[in-house]
Image: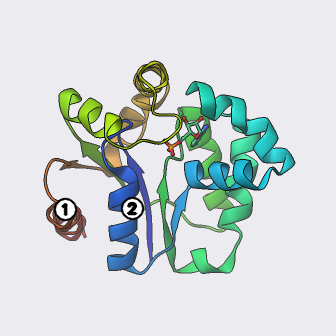
Amino acid sequence: MTRLVLVGPPGAGKGTQAVALSQRLSIPHISTGDLFRAHVAEQTPLGEEAKRYLDSGELVPDSVTNEMVRERLAESDTKAGFLLDGFPRNTKQAEVLGEMLAESDSALDAVIQLDVPEDVLVERLLGRGRTDDTEEVIRRRQQVYQSETAPLLDYYRDILVKVDGVGEVDEVSSRIVNALDARA
Ligand code: AMP
């Protein structure tokens, strides 16, 4: 059973690594960004509400985000573990996640920090071409990461596994798997 969170600034390769890692570890990949984008595409009420936040690079309100995650974590495929990507994004969400897991007597096993230097981040984001990848929104998402999300690294210091995120996809995912094994 492996319950993991992947943390890193926008452009660190979280999405790519999450896909690779969820395959290697046979656990579902839960990306709140992907869930929001699916709601926006399907024009659900949640999507209508979330859209302006995604478009501006701001965080969707915790109440909306936490409920969406609660529902996802209630699905049976997460019993074998999960890999959260993009959640939690602030310490309040982290507290709520802790409470949700405690309800089923579980807890996170590790929080993986993908470490990537800033010049590499900007280069990757500009090459990605997502609709929220304009320069202004990218800059805002980086600010939000620094002020809201970076404090999680301290919050999770006891279970934090810091991994160098620069390199080929397989190389980085092997580094993550090795770092997790080394802890076990
Ligand atoms: P991502 O795909 O993780 O880069 O997320 C894209 C956008 O979705 C973010 O800029 C936020 O607007 C929203 N989002 C994703 N995850 C969260 C979260 N945990 N809390 C609030 N907003 C989020």
Q: Can residue 130 be seen in this view?
A: yes
* Secondary structure beneath label 2: helix
Amino acid type, mark 2 = Ala
Residue 176: horizontal and vertical position, in percent?
Answer: 23, 62
Which label is found at residue 131?
none
| Ligand 1 image position (quadrant) | top right
| Mark 2 crowdedness (10 Å alpha carbons): few <14, some 14-19, many ≥20 | many
- Judged left or right of residue 147, residue 166 is left
Query: What color scheme is it?
Result: rainbow
Q: CB at mark 2 closer than 8 A to ligand 1?
A: no
| Mark 1 crowdedness (10 Å alpha carbons): few <14, some 14-19, many ≥20 | some
Taking the spot 63% from the left edge, 50% from the top edge, the residue there is 37
Taking the spot 40% from the left edge, 25% from the top edge, the residue there is 142
Residue 99: horizontal and vertical position, in percent?
Answer: 65, 51
Q: Distance between the residues labelled 2 and 1?
A: 15 Å
Q: Name the residue under label 1.
A: 179
169 lies above or below 13: below
Residue 48: horizontal and vertical position, in percent?
Answer: 80, 40
* Secondary structure beneath label 1: helix
Taking the spot 53% from the left edge, 44% from the top edge, the residue there is 88
Report the front residue among 105 and 11: 11
50 lies above or below 151: below
Q: Name, please, the residue furthest toward the right.
A: 45
Q: Which circle's residue, 2 or 1, is located before the other in the chain?
A: 2
Report the front residue among 101 and 59: 59
Report the front residue among 90 and 55: 55
In the picture, the quarter occupied by the N terminus is bottom left
Amino acid type, mark 1 = Ala
Q: Name the residue under label 2.
A: 18
- Judged left or right of residue 20, residue 57 is right
